[in-house]
Amino acid sequence: MTVLDLFAGAGGAALGLHAAGFEHVACVERDASAAATLRAAGFPAIEADVRDLDYAALAGTIDVLWASPPCQAWSSANQHEGPKGEDDIARNGWPWTLRIVGIVRPRWAIFENVKNARAYVERAVLPELRKLYAHVSLWVLNAADHGAPQSRTRIFVIAGPRPVRPPLGTVRRTMRDAIGIAYDRPSPCVMTNEGKGRPTDPAWWRKLNNASDALAIATDGARRKLTLGECATLQTFPEGYPFAGRPEERYRQVGNAVPPSLAAAVARAVLAAEAGLDTIREGLSAVRASAERVERVLAAAVGFVRQRPPRGVGLEDIDGFVGRNVGQLRAMVRALIHLKGL
């Protein structure tokens, strides 16, 4: 499936989509250092503001449009207030994204954003998408439930021709599992300012504002900042991923990224819906339940008939009939379960 990736950053979402088998047509990112990272990682980066490009030539050619619109308007620094007036568009990328969706008309549209934007999305985004797509869903997912050793909650909007089931969670990984820090829970969210470090005042770092705060607790206040590599690992970037730019730019790229493992989980859920596997699973469940009911009825009938067998019918005839039919039922269910590797 082909992908147009908007606000691509350093490629966290792109890595997850690629791992799920998607092929990128373009990754649009205006930040020069992040675009350089995308190019170094082998993605087709276009260094530009998404508002400045002409998307008409892509109309009808894109399977999936992925976008992580700017979310500063809902950040903690902005007290989660959202855009301040109609002119405050620089920090709200949703209108631009919807305009591009209307031009490109991808088969699927996937959007990721901070959870504080949910009210705005439900009010201003979902109604517009429902004009274009038969099925529109909003999920709230935590990266810690999908392979990332950090707690990072985000909303996802999935719009397309079929309903999509949210991905199932996995066993949670801890900071100790990932980077050997004695903290037996997923890390707090990796932030863009991890490279600055924090004071060792317990009144500050015990609030667990970011991943480095957990490090301070794990070492009883022996403060150091997390390395770029540690932050990247907590985000599930592969070792040696080629982040470009100055140190503060690289930390910012990591902190702003979508964890690749989370993006991959979302992408695979969409692939399952596209392939109709959810429908197959529902059918298998119904077949399995029906077979179990039939087997119970046969067992009950056998028990009754064995007590008072009809004249001329031996017990071996009864057992043989049941064995043949139950065996066929079981074989049919096994064959369906193995269909397409399920």
Image (cartoon, rainbow, N blue to C red):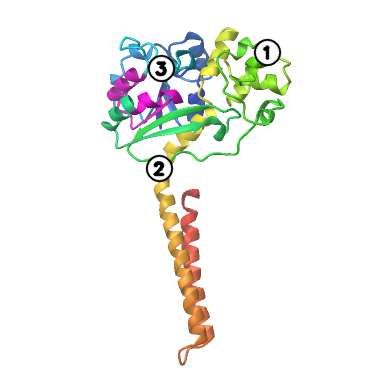
Residue 120 placement, left or right of 315: left
Q: Is residue 48 visible?
A: yes
Marks 2 and 3 in Cβ contact (< 8 Å): no
Give the mark nearest the N terminus, 1 or 2.
1
* Crowd rating for badge 1 (residues with CA inside 10 Å; few <14, some 14–19, many 20+): few
Residue numbers of the magenta segment = 94-122
Nearest the eye: 222 or 318: 222
In depth, the one of 328 and 202 nearer the eye is 202
Residue, far bottom: 311
Give, as a three-letter code, the residue at label 1.
Asp
- Label 2 element class: helix
Q: Are marks 3 and 1 in contact (CB under 8 Å)?
A: no
| Residue 29 % position (x, y) | 44, 14
Q: Marks 3 and 1, how far apart in space?
A: 29 Å
Residue pointed to by mark 2:
275
| Residue beneath the point at 31% across and 24% down | 124
Residue 81, label in figure = 3
**Label 2: how many residues lie within 10 Å, few (<14), some (14-19) or many (20+)?**
few
Q: Is residue 188 above or below residue 311?
A: above
Residue 148 location (% of width, % of height):
58, 30
Tell me whether the residue at label 1 lies in contact with that at label 2, contact meaning CB atoms closer than 8 angstroms: no
Name the residue rendered at 60%, 39% in the picture. Answer: 171
CA gap, disc 1 and disc 2: 53 Å
The residue located at (37%, 15%) in the rendering is: 83
Residue 70 is situated, as x and y percent measured from the top left of the image, at: 42, 17
User: Which of the two discs, 2 and 3, labels the residue nearer the N terminus?
Assistant: 3
Q: Nearer the viewer, mark 1 or mark 2?
A: 1
